[in-house]
Image: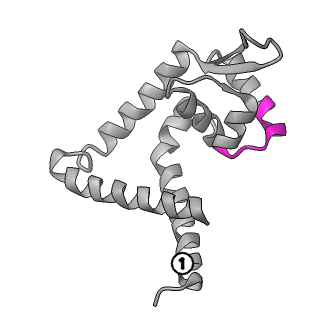
Amino acid sequence: MFGATEFATMMLDLERISQASVEALFAVGCLQHELTMNQLHILLELNKGQRYTVGELSHMVGILKGNMAGVCKRLEERGLIMRRRGQEDERMVLLQITDSGKCVVDDIFQQIQQKHSVAFRSENAEVFEKILEGLKALYALLEQI
């Protein structure tokens, strides 16, 4: 029988391996564009097309709200994101990615595609589908915990 101890141990291993793999995947792009992983994570979330408040984005990317202001300020100074006041409530500040920010994200994804083109071949589509199904099941389970 599979118990809590085995699950917790595997989750810790997964976290360690996942973090190292993600950092390796994005390392060259981050270095080239002088981004931290936190800054890249913000750009990736904003690149999905939504506008977020600092608090919403803080929760999504796992950065303390007190640290978000500084991280976002540096991205804004570089012209990669912009802050806009809410139309309905001017006290609300919304963040969105700029065209320059989108170009940075596109460039990083192109680098990943080129570097790992073998992994992204069509014959691996079935493997990716299985992985995605497994991840969705894991996410659903973790939301229950």
Left or right of 133 in this view: 20: right
Q: Position of residue 53 (x, y in %)?
A: 71, 27
Residue 65 on the magenta span: yes
Q: Is residue 59 above or below residue 78?
A: below
Please identify the quarter of the rendering in which residue 79 is found.
top right
Q: Is residue 60 above or below residue 44?
A: below
Picture residue at 51% right of the left edge, 44% below the top: 27
Picture residue at 48% right of the left edge, 56% below the top: 21
Q: Residue furthest bottom?
A: 1
For the record, the magenta segment spans: 61-69
Residue 131 on the magenta span: no
Picture residue at 45% right of the left edge, 47% below the top: 25
Left or right of 21 in this view: 40: right
Please identify the quarter of the rendering in which residue 59 is found.
top right
Identify residue type, mark 1: Phe
**Residue sitting nearer the eye, 48 or 114:** 48
Q: Position of residue 126 (x, y in %)?
A: 21, 55
Q: Coloured how?
A: one colour
At label 1, counting other C-alpha atoms closer than 10 Å, the crowd grade (few under 14, some 14-19, many 20 or more) is few
